[in-house]
Image (tube, grey):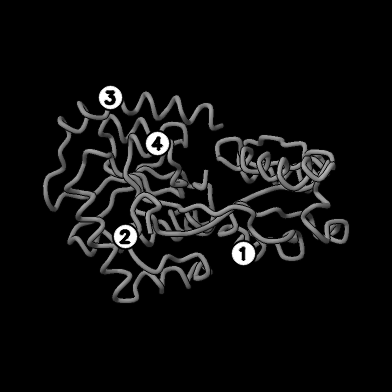
């Protein structure tokens, strides 16, 4: 997610904080130069490869292009792995991360977030088993999977402690998966009873695979997804914040959100580091 294991996350953030000041001092971006952005193209509808053209597509891609246009420049997409995004920013290989990254407190020592979507983890099951899960508490004691690269496994555990264990019901069996696509595969194969993804991704997935999945309840936590910039890169942060404000004001941002069926998750104003 991109909304995207927390133990690894803290180690990445610590390593990033150690190398960031030197990297930023050496790689100042010239005004008007293209903006390089790290992206992992496996999180539709935020970023993915269009099956017909093979080109990058999605909400984040459109948003990045629009932000760059407001600044009178272009954006250069650098495809990488999720685990390499933070180090790519730290070492100056990219200027920003725009790839469905969740704005988490433990990441903010290293990066500043310009938040552009409000979302939350959502339980879902196969359509064939939807009748078994008429309420969220029906998931207690069941095997539920989510990408181990995200905060979702931890969020599932918190919800289970509060809604299952405290009520005397068995805890959810939390399973980390190799991404959201792997979770859906295991769900269809019956190796999981349910799965969790960011709520913003499910309308697109359900549209691509009709009559396959059903949501259970509503999102059980709320988070922001943000564009990440090195904490000390104040000039670029200011430029992008101004551009984001303009996109919201002139309606361009809302049009991009509507195009990707994300209007319900759109932010109403500029939000930095989850501060309204």
Q: Percent position (x, y) of residue 159?
A: 68, 45
Residue linked to disc 3: 19
Q: Is mark 2 on a helix, strand or loop?
A: helix
Residue shown at 43%/54% (left/top)? 56
Q: Is mark 4 on a helix, strand or loop?
A: helix
Residue linked to disc 4: 85
Q: Closer to the N terminus: mark 3 or mark 1?
A: 3
Q: Closer to the N terminus: mark 4 or mark 1?
A: 4
Residue shown at 64%/45% (left/top)? 181
How far apart are the two marked residues, 2 and 4, measured between alpha carbons?
19 Å
Q: Which residue lies furthest to the bottom in this view?
A: 250
Give the answer, above or below, for where 69 lies relative to 167.
below
Q: Percent position (x, y) of residue 127?
A: 81, 60
Residue linked to disc 2: 65
How far apart are the two marked residues, 3 and 1, measured between alpha carbons?
39 Å
Query: Are dots 1 and 2 in contact, CB under 8 Å?
Result: no
Q: In the visual, does 154 lie left or right of 81? A: right
| Callout 2 crowding tier (Cα within 10 Å): few <14, some 14–19, many ≥20 | some
- The mark lying in front, picked from 3 and 1, is 3
- The mark lying in front, picked from 2 and 3, is 3
| Callout 3 crowding tier (Cα within 10 Å): few <14, some 14–19, many ≥20 | some
Q: Is mark 1 on a helix, strand or loop?
A: helix
Q: Closer to the N terminus: mark 2 or mark 3?
A: 3
Residue linked to disc 1: 203
């Amino acid at each position: 997610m991109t909304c995207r294991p927390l133990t690894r996350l803290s180690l990445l953030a610590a390593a990033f904080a150690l190398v960031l000041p030197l990297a930023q001092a050496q790689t100042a971006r010239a005004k008007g130069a293209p903006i390089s952005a790290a992206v992992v193209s496996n999180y539709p509808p935020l970023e993915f490869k269009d099956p017909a053209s093979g080109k990058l597509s999605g909400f984040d891609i459109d948003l990045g292009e629009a932000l760059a246009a407001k600044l009178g420049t272009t954006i250069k997409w650098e495809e990488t792995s999720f685990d390499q995004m933070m180090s790519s920013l730290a070492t100056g290989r990219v200027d920003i991360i725009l790839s469905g990254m969740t704005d988490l407190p433990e990441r903010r020592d290293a990066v500043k977030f310009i938040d552009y979507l409000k979302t939350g983890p959502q339980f879902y099951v196969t359509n064939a088993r939807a009748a078994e899960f008429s309420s969220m508490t029906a998931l207690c004691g069941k095997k539920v999977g989510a990408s181990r690269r995200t905060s979702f496994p931890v969020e599932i555990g918190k919800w289970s402690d509060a809604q299952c264990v405290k009520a005397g019901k068995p805890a959810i069996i939390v399973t980390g998966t190799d991404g959201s696509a792997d979770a859906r595969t295991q769900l269809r194969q019956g190796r999981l009873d349910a799965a969790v993804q960011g709520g913003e991704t499910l309308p697109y997935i359900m549209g691509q695979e009709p009559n396959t999945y059903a949501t259970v309840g509503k999102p059980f936590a709320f988070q922001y997804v943000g564009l990440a910039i090195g904490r000390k890169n104040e000039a670029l942060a200011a430029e992008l914040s101004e551009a984001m404000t303009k996109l919201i004001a002139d309606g361009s941002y809302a049009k991009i959100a509507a195009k990707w069926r994300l209007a319900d998750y759109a932010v109403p104003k500029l939000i930095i580091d989850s501060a309204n």
